[in-house]
Structures are given as C-alpha cells and as structure tokens.
Image: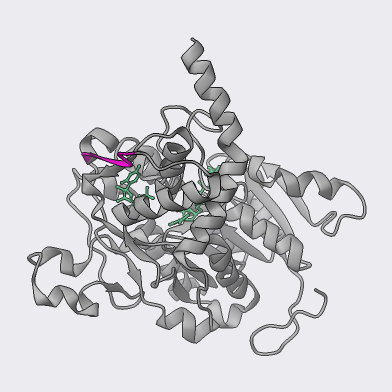
Amino acid sequence: MANRVDLDGRPIKTMTICMIGAGGFIGSHLCEKLMDETLHTVIAVDVYNDKIRHLLEPAETEGCAWSGRIQFHRLNIKHDSRLEGLIKMSDLTINLAAICTPADYNTRPLDTIYSNFIDALPVVKYCSEYAKRVIHFSTCEVYGKTVGSFLPKDHPLRLQPEFYVLNENETPCIFGSIEKQRWSYACAKQLIERLIYAEGAENGLEFTIVRPFNWIGPRMDFIPGIDGPSEGVPRVLACFSNNLLRGEPLKLVDGGESQRTFIYIKDAIEAVMLMIENPERANGQIFNVGNPNNEVTVRQLAEMMTEVYSKVSGGKILDVPTIDVSSEEFYGEGYDDSDKRIPDMTIINKQLGWNPKTSLFDLLESTLTYQHKTYAEAIKRDIAKSTAS
Ligand code: NAD
Ligand code: UDP
C-alpha cells in the first residue's frame, strides 16, 4: 500500500479527494477501493450515505485500516456554501452527483437538466478558480443514437464499425427531437462536457471526463418497495432483479431489441483508479469506460439473468419468463432509446493500458448472488404483507 507507483514507475503522492455523489452506486465502490488499497483521504459529499455506512462506522473505531481517512458531509450541492471550502482543501474533485435514471429524463426533465448541468456549474467553477484537478462523470448517452440506426434494417453499411462503434474524438452526438424529452439528460451532460473542455482550453483547467457504458453490479439503484419507492423505476439491472426476486415476468420495453454492452463495476473502478493516480496521462482526456465484449440485446440480458438467477437461488424458471410492454406504458410520453452502444477502447488503452476482464455471465452470477442474499427475505415479507392486507 505504501509503495504504490504510477504507470511510469513514479511513487504516487497521497492526496485528498473531494468525492461528490460518493453515497451512490459508483461512489460507494470507489470509496471502498480507495480505503482498501490506497492511503488517499476521501471527503465524501452526498445527501445519502446508506451505501457507504460500512466504511464510515468502522472508520470511527481505532485500528481500522482506513480510520480517519474518510469523512462524510451530508450536503446538497444545489445550495450549500460549504462546497467551495471542501473543493479548495482537496487536491482532486470527482463529481458523480446526478439524476441518472432514464425513468426521470422524460417525466422530470427540469430536475434532470438542473441536476446534470446547472448544479455541476459551481463544481467546475471552483475547480477552475482554485486550480484543482477535476474528474467529471458524464455518460455514453452523449453519443445518442448510432449513425447506422438511420439506415434501412438490412443495409450492409450497418455492419461497418464506423457506423456504430463510438469513439470519443470522432463520433458525432445524435439526439432525438426536443419533444423526445429522454434526451434532456444526454443534452445536459453534453453541455457540461463542452463547458469543462472550454475551461481546459481557455483557463487551463486540468480535467478528465468519464463516459460510463452501463456499469452494473451490487448496490446499483434500489429494489422498489424494499429500499426505494414501490412505484419507482430504477435502471434495467434493478428492474429485472426485482422481477426475478418477486417471481414475476421481466418486462421488455418495445420488444427488448436495443443493444447494450455491460461492464462489471469492479473492472470499471480499476479504470477510474488509473485516472486518479496518473494525472499526466489522464488530464485533458475523455475516456469511454465499457466492455465491448459483453454486448447483448435487452431480451438476451433478460434470458441470461433468468437463467443465472435460477442457478443462484435454486428457484424454477417461469413458464412465461418475459412480457412485452410499450415504452409509452412503461416510461410515459417522450421516451426514446439508444439503439446500440459499443465503446471504442483505443484511447483508454493507449493512455492507461486498461482493459475490462469480467464476462457478462460471471458478473451476473456475482451480482445476482448479492441481490438474492440481500433482498430475498425482505421480498418474501413484503409479498406476505401485501397478500394479508
Ligand atoms: P447514483 O444515482 O447511484 O449516484 C449519484 C449520487 O449523487 C447519489 O448518491 C445522489 O444522492 C448524489 N447526488 C445527486 N444529486 C446530488 C446533490 N444535488 N447533492 C449531493 N449529492 C447528490 O448513480 P451512479 O450510477 O453511481 O452514477 C454516478 C455518475 O455516473 C452520474 O453522474 C451518472 O450520470 C454517471 N453514469 C453512470 C452510469 C452507470 O452505468 N452507472 C452510466 C452513465 C453515466
Ligand atoms: N428496459 C427494459 N425493461 C426494464 C427496464 C429497462 O426493457 O424493466 C430497457 C430500456 O428500455 C433500455 C435498456 O433496458 O433499452 C437499458 O435501460 P437502463 O434503464 O438500464 O438505462 P440505459 O442503458 O437506457 O441508460
């Protein structure tokens, strides 16, 4: 731990990291890694801390490996003057805070735009003013739809990588019309990327932008009715986990034809660690972080999760494991979808020598084992309660 070196063999200086959104899915895994494997200090900022409580409570006990190296500040970055001081006293700021569940993009477009653009402005401003490095979390959704999606279904050009592989420096960003409010998120993220890039170009801000491609794993989102609202709609991993835990068919939006590449959170966190500890290689870069080898349609994901869940829970597979539902019924008006998301890995490979490792089957096996252990009993009690009333 003490002798960590960077990719060029230089010793890594310990730093203080202001992590905004540290209590979320990605933040909780990043905090865990930083506490377990480094001597860096984390100033964890969020409105919630349930997902990092296991790190905060032992830290108060003397003798714990990370005692005194993580402190939690419960604050909302929308309106809290303490943010400036926390950024000023840190060496690096990592901004993860966002509204980032698709069910919100078309139903709460104002909150989505404010959260992803307006609320991030002071973070960028303070980093620029105090000459602090920033790692900002954007999204693969800034690419929007692929160029190939506008060609007829069986057109041969659809098979050419340049019509669907997404490259940070070359691929255009293609969104739907304004009434398709789904794109409010992608558009807000794109504008904050452009602002950060401009701060770099005009004022010398040291930045790295991360574009995650469907990172999944334990602690992602919530299970409706257990640790989140019963009517809430989380991202697909938690939606399908909820269906499997309750023994209900999985809902395929518009036939489940969209394609995604899924990456295990622990592989992705390795990439973020390299960015944190190799500023000279990461500054000024935009990085795709995904696993191009784990591509499936949403229908195939549903089938695979059904099979893996039956294996880890010992339960049987339903006669009708999936049902089709229209996007209008599932998400409401203004929903639209990205058709296909394959990350080009050239830049991250060249700069940081990073590659993802975990197959989709393996990552689903460990994640669904976690979901089953964490939620199966609570779901049983929830179902018993609602049948009794
Ligand atoms: P998450 O919702 O689990 O975490 C976000 C955290 O930010 C939450 O704990 C939330 O409470 C906090 N937060 C939001 N607004 C805040 C505010 N005003 N003040 C203080 N805290 C606030 O989401 P995640 O999956 O961990 O994603 C983190 C980042 O990565 C987001 O910017 C998201 O857009 C981006 N991203 C993630 C994925 C993915 O695959 N998980 C994909 C694309 C982009
Ligand atoms: N989806 C689905 N059923 C669900 C939840 C999501 O078919 O219960 C689909 C959704 O329409 C999208 C894909 O799964 O095509 C991935 O959705 P997610 O919410 O994880 O986020 P996205 O990748 O679109 O950002």
Does the magenta run of residues contain 324? Answer: yes
Residue found at x 55% / y 27%? 380
Residue found at x 26% / y 50%? 256
- Magenta highlight range: 319-326
Residue 386 percent across, percent down from the top left:
48, 17
Q: Quadrant of residue 40?
A: bottom right
- Is residue 40 positioned above or below 253 on the image? below
In the foreground, 283 or 132: 283
- Is residue 243 positioned above or below 147 on the image? above
Residue 131 percent across, percent down from the top left:
61, 68
- Colour scheme shown: one colour
Locate the N terminus and report the quarter of the image it occupies: bottom right
Residue 361 visible at all: yes
Residue 353 percent across, percent down from the top left:
53, 84
In the foreground, 255 or 190: 255
- Is residue 374 positioned above or below 346 on the image? above
Asked whether, in this view, residue 149 is left or right of residue 349, the answer is left
